[in-house]
Each structure stands twice: as C-alpha cells, then as structure tokens.
Image (spheres, helix red, strand yellow):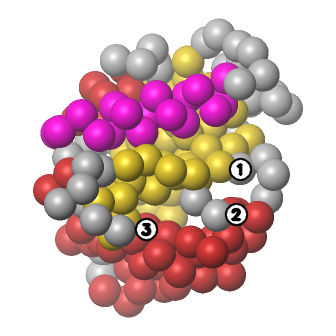
C-alpha cells in the first residue's frame, strides 16, 4: 500500500474527476434532494465534457488526492464566480473541496486546501472566496480556520431545490 498523494489533474483525468465529483457530492448531500433533481444536477455539473473544459482552462486548477491509483478526493480553484457585489476581476475562488468519507478528518482536507490556496495566491495576495452550504457547520469551521468570514448568501439550485449557501471571503 502506497502513501496518498495530491497531484494536479490533467485533461486525461476528466473521467475520473467526473465520477469522483458525482460520488462525493452524492455521498455528502444526496440525501437532501429528490432523485430526479439530484440526477439532473450531477449530469450537468459533473458531465465529462464539462470536466474536460475545466481541466483544459488555464485559469482553473484541479487537484486529485489519490491512494493506490484511485482518486479519493478533489479540490478545484479558479476565478471567483460567486454572486456578491464585492467580487472583483482577479479575485480567486475555491470552487470545490471534497473527500470520500473514509478520507475525511485525517488531515488530507487541510493539505488539499493549502495546495489550492498556494495556487490561488501564486501571483500575490488577493481576496479569496468560497461558497458553503448554510447547514454545514463543519465546513464553515474548516474555512474559518483559513481566515474566511461570512459576507453574504445566495441560493444554489439543485433541480427544484434552492439551497441557502453562505458566501465566505478571505481578505489579503
């Protein structure tokens, strides 16, 4: 058995990322949605071609946590797209950070977070953003440890369900 590794994903990882992203979202939030809404969301948000586009785009970066050749976590970062009036061009966003359940609470989320933050700040200090579900206090505490504070909220659609999401920001 080898040690887990974090590596930058490439376009060749699109299928693995698509599968893992759908699996981690479902594992974390799947119980909240009617099956048809969940399926529609997963089919759109984590579609293979969409993952290829993200992985090929120079303004985005995705990392995989792998163990024995299997992807068990992922993080994604890029330009901020959150609906907040203070977002400015050049601001960065942590788009996703998910680990399969057996890999949570072992320090790997923190390692992936630091990897994403280092990439987001590679050109120097700038505001960073993340959206987090309002009913996920564990994730909110996790992001607070990295200096993120709540500055707003918005509705995140998963089919007909409109989740209340908090917008968090970290100042440079």
CA gap, disc 3 and disc 2: 13 Å
Farthest residue, direction front: 1
Label disc, if present, on residue 21 of the rendered structure: 3
CA gap, disc 2 and disc 1: 6 Å
Mark 2 surroundings within 10 Å by alpha-carbon count, few (fewer than 14), some (14 through 19), many (20 or more): some
**Whole-percent x and y of residue 142?**
31, 28
Mark 1 surroundings within 10 Å by alpha-carbon count, few (fewer than 14), some (14 through 19), many (20 or more): some
Mark 3 surroundings within 10 Å by alpha-carbon count, few (fewer than 14), some (14 through 19), many (20 or more): many
Nearest to N terminus: mark 3 or mark 2: 3
Vertical arrangement, residue 70 with respect to residue 131, above or below = below
Is residue 115 highlighted in magenta?
yes
**Whole-percent x and y of residue 110?**
34, 31
Task: Find out whether the residues at labels 2 and 1 contact each other: C-beta distance under 8 Å.
Answer: yes
**On the rendered structure, is 3 left or right of 51?**
left
Q: Give the quadrant of residue 73.
A: bottom left
Label 3: state its secondary structure: helix
In which quadrant will I find the N terminus?
A: bottom left
**Total number of numbered labels?**
3
In which quadrant will I find the C terminus?
A: top right
Label 1: state its secondary structure: loop
Query: Nearest the camera: 23 or 15?
Result: 15
Q: Residue at x 37, y 20 (%)?
A: 144
Q: Give the quadrant of residue 81.
A: top right
Magenta-tinted stretch = 105-121
Residue 159 at least partly seen: no
Q: Which residue is mark 1?
A: 60
Q: Which residue is mark 2?
A: 54
């Amino acid at each position: 058995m080898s040690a887990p590794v974090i590596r930058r994903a490439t376009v060749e990882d699109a299928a693995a990322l698509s599968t893992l992203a759908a699996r981690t979202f479902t594992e974390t939030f799947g119980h909240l949605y009617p099956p048809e809404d969940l399926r529609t969301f997963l089919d759109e948000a984590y579609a293979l071609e969409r993952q290829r586009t993200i992985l090929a785009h120079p303004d985005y970066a995705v990392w995989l946590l792998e163990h024995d050749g299997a992807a068990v976590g992922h993080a994604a970062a890029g330009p901020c797209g959150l609906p907040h009036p203070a977002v400015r061009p050049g601001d960065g966003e942590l788009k996703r950070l998910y680990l399969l359940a057996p890999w949570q609470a072992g320090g790997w989320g923190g390692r992936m977070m630091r990897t994403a933050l280092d990439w987001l700040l590679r050109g120097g200090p700038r505001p960073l953003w993340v959206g987090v579900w309002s009913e996920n206090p564990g994730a909110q505490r996790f992001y607070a440890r990295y200096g993120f504070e709540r500055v707003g909220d918005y509705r995140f659609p998963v089919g007909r369900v409109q989740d209340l999401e908090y917008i968090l920001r970290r100042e440079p």
